[in-house]
Image: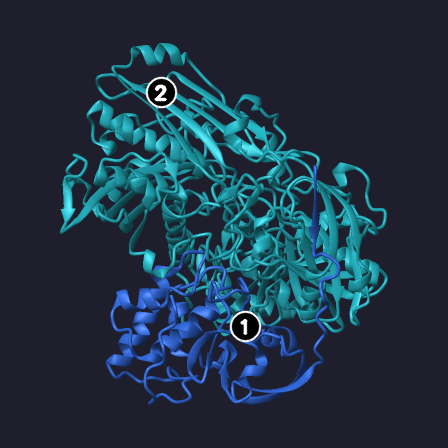
Chain colours: A cyan, B blue
């Protein structure tokens, strides 16, 4: 019997599916270790000022309350800023919880009450008496545009935008022009699982930390540096993460608090944030954009100008690539880009799904629609006429780019050729129908990562890497890659992640996990293959004498000679013959580092094109997104099933950005007023209708051996713009301030 | 500069209520607890009984992650106190199926990839089970509407719809129901009240 052992590219059910539908998958707040204490965070009601008094006596008098931690009694911790900097920290001076009396942002954590039960901790926190002297705060971006400055290159991955040519000349050369101001407000990630850390005290400052994070190693490094712990004392475990979207890239303050309390009380402690407190840390920054485009008579762009100003905190420079994409996505000689920050009394913004690109693509892709109308061209035809076959920003050829296929296949599936371009021309009964499109570009990145592969005497392969699965499908695709690499059935493979005792892996973000961990897994399996060949050569297999690893293949649970497939040995037998319980191998140490210092030879990107249909009630201003086609070019798709889900989710996010999401700041209080799940609107099931996902064929031998470009971000790009453009097509109203709520259409 | 006081002193302290014995019938088994009367059903499950399959997503009845079945009807367990349910049959995600025999909804959620991070999933499945028990939703639009009390931030709604419709259609076609009515203590009763949307 031949076992099925080719998995890459096949739709595969999630291997962690049973644990998730049975409720046995354990998230950070669900490790009920013995003798657990509960911490409840008290948040500042003011936005700027100082704490002048904390009276904890009445709280401490409650039986069952163990301690009230605040800046008044936190022990001496690490002094230098660098100890508080995590892998994803931007430039500046990181926020230190409970460090001083100074209040820097609304809802700043000011105390932690620790008690025997959750109920008691919550009650005690509610009666903790704190007095403040409040100072005037500044939270309104529009009032601080004059002070905006160009930030340094503080954060990993941030590229200061590069202008080229002469925009003024390009503008003058154009016969058609457009200019627009675009804006969106702060948005919060709001993963379903609230941030929580369960810290298990094992004695002698040895901790098991169950943390909600997108990077167990990042959390570990942080608590090691801040609390002076060794690697052995600070084990961080994160097997399941209930959504991330970027919010778990940096360690959140509940981790600090839970570790602090555990070390001080020498007890196990859990700290969970409330949904309200999920609005007290990083968010997608409010950003104001200005785009100006000019085009020649044939529709070719002669000038692109894209300027953005975003908010950041007083203490860190959060940077993201907002405008840089406008110098890459379309062919144009004259491009002028500028990106600035303005400091406000808010918490530092944080990468949120497709950071920068989701923002920039709102400006660029709505502007492209406006420009198409100004030039009298169909928006799809206009984009095709400005197709970029060479990355002018990096001055490099693309390793691969099949955006043309996205345009072609997406338009065909959607029926774009039946579109009447005149706004307000299409109807369904009383409803105005609009068709719009957009698209985007995202980096295909790879980070250094390690993995280990281990085959036991039963023939079961365990592959491990301390990465994460925030719902992206990491468990499943790594199982597929490992199974295919060593020719084993899926059932004979287990992939383990989310533990700092495993080989080191980067945070899960930037859409780089599939490429980075996938490559490490493939390399570890290849290294294990070599060990297995060595073992075969130690035995009496004459056929394998002197053969090289390239002369054998792994399939059907066997290693066999390529030139004579009947010459085969069962992998399990090799382990049994070795006399060892297992045969193991790791990939070479940090394989990506060498690649990283070499100058790149190619521009490596994923692309997409999105087509959206809206129906707008002209009397009520209500908008329903009835159809979306999202065509994605992202290299090789390891698992079309989980990949489709990621893009479906991206479309939901895009609809949400276009129509619903907005953290509403009341500047009188400097506070997000809708800090809950009822008033921070995201789509519900009834808001979501037909969504088609297309993965166009794209082979890429340059990005990585697997040809993977990553999918977490790219699917979101252009969705919000496509919806806004469809609304314009339906109504003739061009709304440039997101979200497009009813009031803006009436 | 202005002075702000959080939790002013002098507010009459609430007397701490003593813990009291509470007996809960969950997934067919009787559990005895000694808890404060202000303990929610959700916290009783998660913090006192280690039934952590039921999730906390907002603690305010806004997200549906904590949905469980009480006498076959879906409720938000964060909005209910444990002491109110001494006479109830409570079914949580742990009671719907087993690793050896998943419920039809659990299997359909896997087959249609109706989740990503998995955190809203137990609530979605319990809510879908409650919806099936109610017997009112037949069409896709009705299912979308009556599943709208359960948020999914990963945006798996299309796949959730497909999974629920498959189980509903199989049931309507008279295919073997398997465990579909698990948690419906009184399946022949009048349909339950629709959850407030």
Q: Above or below — where is A152 with respect to A28?
A: above
- Classify 10 Å Cα crowding around label 1: few (below 14), some (14-19), many (20 and above): many
Mark 2–mark 1 contact, CB under 8 Å? no
A433 to the left or right of A53: left
Q: Which residue is mark 1?
A: B53
State the quadrant of the C terminus of chain A. Answer: top left
Chain to which mark 1 belongs: B
Q: Which residue is mark 2?
A: A332
Chain to which mark 2 belongs: A
Image quadrant assignment for residue A589: top right
Q: Above or below — where is A35 with respect to A234?
A: below
- Classify 10 Å Cα crowding around label 2: few (below 14), some (14-19), many (20 and above): many
Residue A426 seen: yes
Residue under the image location 53 percent in, 63 percent down: B57
Foreground: disc 2 or disc 1: 1
* x then y, percent, for residue B36: 67, 78
Image quadrant assignment for residue A137: top right
- In the image, A181 versus A350, the foreground residue is A181
What SS does tag 2 mark? loop
- In the image, A681 versus A506, the foreground residue is A681
Query: How far is the residue under mark 2 from the one under mark 1?
Result: 54 Å
What SS does tag 1 mark? loop
Residue A697 seen: no
């Amino acid at each position: 019997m031949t076992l099925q052992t080719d998995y890459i590219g096949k739709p595969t059910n999630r291997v962690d599916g049973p644990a998730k539908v049975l409720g046995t998958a354990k998230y950070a707040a669900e490790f009920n270790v013995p003798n657990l204490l509960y911490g409840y965070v008290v948040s500042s009601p003011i936005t700027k000022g100082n704490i002048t008094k904390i009276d904890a006596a009445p709280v401490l008098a409650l039986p069952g309350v163990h301690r009230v931690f605040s800046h008044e009694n936190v022990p001496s911790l690490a002094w230098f800023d660098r100890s508080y900097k995590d892998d994803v920290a931007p430039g500046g001076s990181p926020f230190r919880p409970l460090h001083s009396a100074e209040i820097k942002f609304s809802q700043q954590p000011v105390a932690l009450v620790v008690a025997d039960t959750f109920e008691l901790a919550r009650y005690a926190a509610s009666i903790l008496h704190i007095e403040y002297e409040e100072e005037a705060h500044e939270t309104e971006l529009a009032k601080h545009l004059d002070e905006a400055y160009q930030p340094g290159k503080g954060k990993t991955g941030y590229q200061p935008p590069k202008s080229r040519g002469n925009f003024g000349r390009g503008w003058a050369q154009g016969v058609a022009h457009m200019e627009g101001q675009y804006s969106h407000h702060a948005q919060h990630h709001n993963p379903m699982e609230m941030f929580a850390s369960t810290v298990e005290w094992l004695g002698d400052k040895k901790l098991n930390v169950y943390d909600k994070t997108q990077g167990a190693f990042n959390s570990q490094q942080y608590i090691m540096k801040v609390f002076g712990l060794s690697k052995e004392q600070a084990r961080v475990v994160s097997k399941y993460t209930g959504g991330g979207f970027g919010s778990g890239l940096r360690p959140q303050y509940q981790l600090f608090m839970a570790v602090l309390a555990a070390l001080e009380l020498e007890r196990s402690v859990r700290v969970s944030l409330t949904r309200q407190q999920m609005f007290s840390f990083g968010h997608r920054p409010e950003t104001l954009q200005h785009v100006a485009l000019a085009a020649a008579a044939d529709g070719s762009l002669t000038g692109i100008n894209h300027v953005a100003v975003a908010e950041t905190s007083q203490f860190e420079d959060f940077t993201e690539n907002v405008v840089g994409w406008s110098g890459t996505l379309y062919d144009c000689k004259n491009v002028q880009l500028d990106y600035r920050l303005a400091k406000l009394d808010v918490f530092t913004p944080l990468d949120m799904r497709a950071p920068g690109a989701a923002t920039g693509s709102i400006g660029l892709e709505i502007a492209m629609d406006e420009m198409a109308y100004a030039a009298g061209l169909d928006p799809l035809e206009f984009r095709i006429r400005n197709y970029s076959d060479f990355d002018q920003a990096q001055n490099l050829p693309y390793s691969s780019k099949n955006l043309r296929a996205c345009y072609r296949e997406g338009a065909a599936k959607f029926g774009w050729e039946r579109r009447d371009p005149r706004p307000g021309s299409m109807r369904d009964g009383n409803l105005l129908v609009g068709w719009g499109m957009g698209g985007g570009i995202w980096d295909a990145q790879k980070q250094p990562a390690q993995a280990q592969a281990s085959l036991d005497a039963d023939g079961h392969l365990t592959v491990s890497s301390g990465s994460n699965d925030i719902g992206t499908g990491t468990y499943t695709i790594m199982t597929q890659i490992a199974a295919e690499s060593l020719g084993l059935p899926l059932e004979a493979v287990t992939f383990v992640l989310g533990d700092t005792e495993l080989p080191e892996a980067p945070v899960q973000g930037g859409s780089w996990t599939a490429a980075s961990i996938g490559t490490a897994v493939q390399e570890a399996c290849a290294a294990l293959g070599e060990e297995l060949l060595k073992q075969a050569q130690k035995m009496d297999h004459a056929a394998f004498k002197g053969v090289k690893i390239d002369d054998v293949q792994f399939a059907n649970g066997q290693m066999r000679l390529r030139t004579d497939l009947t010459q085969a040995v069962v992998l399990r037998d090799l382990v049994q013959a070795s006399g060892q319980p297992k045969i193991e191998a790791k990939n070479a140490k940090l394989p990506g580092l060498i690649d990283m210092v070499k100058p790149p030879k190619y521009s490596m990107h994923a692309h997409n094109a999105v087509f959206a249909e809206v129906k707008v009630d002209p009397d009520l201003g209500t908008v329903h997104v009835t159809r979306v086609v999202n065509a994605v070019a992202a290299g090789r798709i390891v698992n079309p099933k989980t990949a489709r889900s990621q893009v479906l989710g991206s479309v939901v996010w895009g609809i949400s950005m276009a129509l619903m999401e907005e953290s509403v700041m009341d500047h009188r209080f400097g506070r997000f007023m809708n800090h809950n799940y009822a008033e921070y609107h995201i789509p519900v099931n009834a808001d979501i209708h037909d969504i088609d996902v297309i993965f166009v064929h794209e082979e890429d031998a340059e990005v990585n051996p697997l040809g993977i470009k990553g999918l977490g971000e790219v699917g979101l790009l252009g969705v919000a713009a496509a919806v806004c453009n469809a609304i314009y097509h339906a109504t003739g109203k061009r709304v440039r301030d997101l979200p497009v709520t009813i009031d803006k259409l009436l | 500069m202005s002075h702000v006081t959080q939790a002013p002193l002098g507010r009459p302290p609430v007397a701490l209520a003593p813990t009291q014995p509470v007996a809960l019938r969950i997934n067919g088994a009787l559990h005895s607890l000694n808890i404060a009367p202000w303990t929610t059903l959700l916290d009783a499950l998660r913090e006192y009984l280690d039934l952590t399959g039921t999730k906390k997503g907002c603690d305010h009845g806004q997200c549906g992650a904590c949905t469980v079945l009480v006498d076959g009807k879906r409720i938000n367990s964060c909005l209910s106190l444990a002491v109110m349910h001494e006479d109830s049959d409570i079914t949580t995600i742990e009671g719907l199926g087993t690793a050896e025999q998943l419920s039809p909804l659990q299997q359909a959620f896997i087959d249609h990839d109706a989740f990503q991070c998995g955190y809203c999933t137990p609530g979605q499945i319990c809510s879908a089970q409650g919806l099936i028990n109610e017997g009112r939703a037949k069409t896709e639009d009705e299912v979308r509407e009556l599943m709208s009390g359960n948020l999914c931030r990963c945006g798996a709604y299309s796949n959730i719809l497909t999974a629920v419709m498959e189980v509903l259609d199989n049931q309507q076609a008279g295919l073997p129901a398997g465990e579909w009515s698990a948690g419906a203590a009184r399946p022949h009763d009048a349909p339950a009240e629709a959850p407030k949307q």
